[in-house]
Image (spheres, helix red, strand yellow):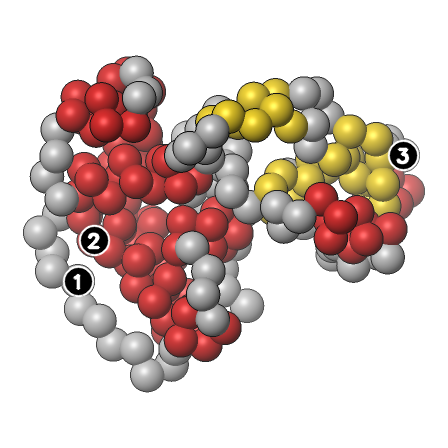
């Protein structure tokens, strides 16, 4: 999976222009049809989407098999039906001390779904905090923010927010949770055990 812009025209132009890189080898990705249709639940609406697929000629040539990647918009996360801003709102509310049931009611989502997001972040909170702390230092070298240490979960959510603040100062407005999707390759609360690519 490759995280891309939410603007389909920009994604298509980048794909046709060879400006999207393979996450495995760094080679240029080319167009390769589309994935299956799916509904993505955002904060205020549900969108029906069919993500673009791409292929890497370099990987395909070296392995002898067609190597493809789904191009996922930055407002989504790997294997999640809800948009990253919905999930981010839930995680932020949990860090503030709200109950999972109240969060689920506020967002109109099942308690089990919200509970799954909370558990997933809780299981990898230290890794998320460390990853975003490194990114905060890369984006703002003068950044020096010690975490409160109230809990690893709260520190992880705060670290995501801090990177959002540092990035705004450097690049201009951009939603922090969309940036979180980009910086984790869509794996912010993934339970696949894959580590995040380091800043670079």
Question: Which residue is denoted by mark 1 in the rendering?
Answer: 147
- Say which element carries label 3: loop
Q: Position of residue 174 (x, y in %)?
A: 46, 60
Q: Is residue 134 visible?
A: no
Left or right, 11 with respect to 180, comes to right
Question: Which residue is denoted by mark 2 in the rendering?
Answer: 155
Q: Position of residue 114 (x, y in %)?
A: 29, 25
**Which is in the foreground here, disc 2 or disc 3?**
2
Left or right, 165 with respect to 77, comes to left
Real-space CA distance between mark 2 and mark 3, rounded to the nearest whole angstrom: 45 Å
Residue at position x 25%, y 76% from top? 144
Question: Which residue is denoted by mark 3 in the rendering?
Answer: 64
Residue at position x 37%, y 62% from top? 164
Real-space CA distance between mark 1 and mark 3, rounded to the nearest whole angstrom: 48 Å
Q: Is residue 46 visible?
A: yes
- Say which element carries label 1: loop
Q: Position of residue 7 (x, y in %)?
A: 66, 48
Q: Quadrant of residue 176?
A: bottom left
Disc with the residue nearer the chain's start (1 vs 3): 3
Q: Quadrant of residue 82?
A: top left
Within-10-Å neighbours for mark 2: few <14, some 14–19, many 20+: many
Quadrant where the C terminus lies? bottom right
């Amino acid at each position: 999976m490759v995280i891309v812009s939410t603007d389909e025209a920009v994604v298509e132009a980048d794909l046709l222009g060879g400006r999207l890189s393979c996450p495995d080898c760094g080679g240029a990705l080319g167009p390769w049809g589309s994935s299956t249709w799916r509904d993505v639940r955002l904060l205020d609406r549900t969108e029906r989407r069919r993500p673009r697929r791409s292929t890497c000629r370099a990987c395909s040539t070296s392995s002898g098999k067609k190597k493809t990647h789904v191009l996922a918009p930055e407002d989504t996360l790997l294997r999640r039906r809800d948009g990253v801003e919905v999930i981010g709102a839930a995680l932020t509310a949990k860090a503030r001390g709200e109950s999972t049931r109240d969060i689920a009611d506020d967002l109109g989502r099942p308690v089990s779904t919200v509970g799954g997001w909370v558990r997933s972040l809780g299981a990898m909170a230290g890794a998320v905090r460390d990853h975003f702390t490194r990114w905060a230092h890369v984006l703002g070298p003068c950044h020096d923010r010690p975490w409160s240490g109230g809990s690893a979960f709260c520190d992880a959510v705060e670290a995501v927010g801090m990177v959002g603040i540092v990035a705004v100062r450097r690049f201009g407005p951009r939603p922090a949770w969309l940036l979180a999707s980009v910086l984790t390759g869509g794996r912010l609360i993934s339970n696949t055990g894959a580590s995040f690519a380091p800043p670079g």
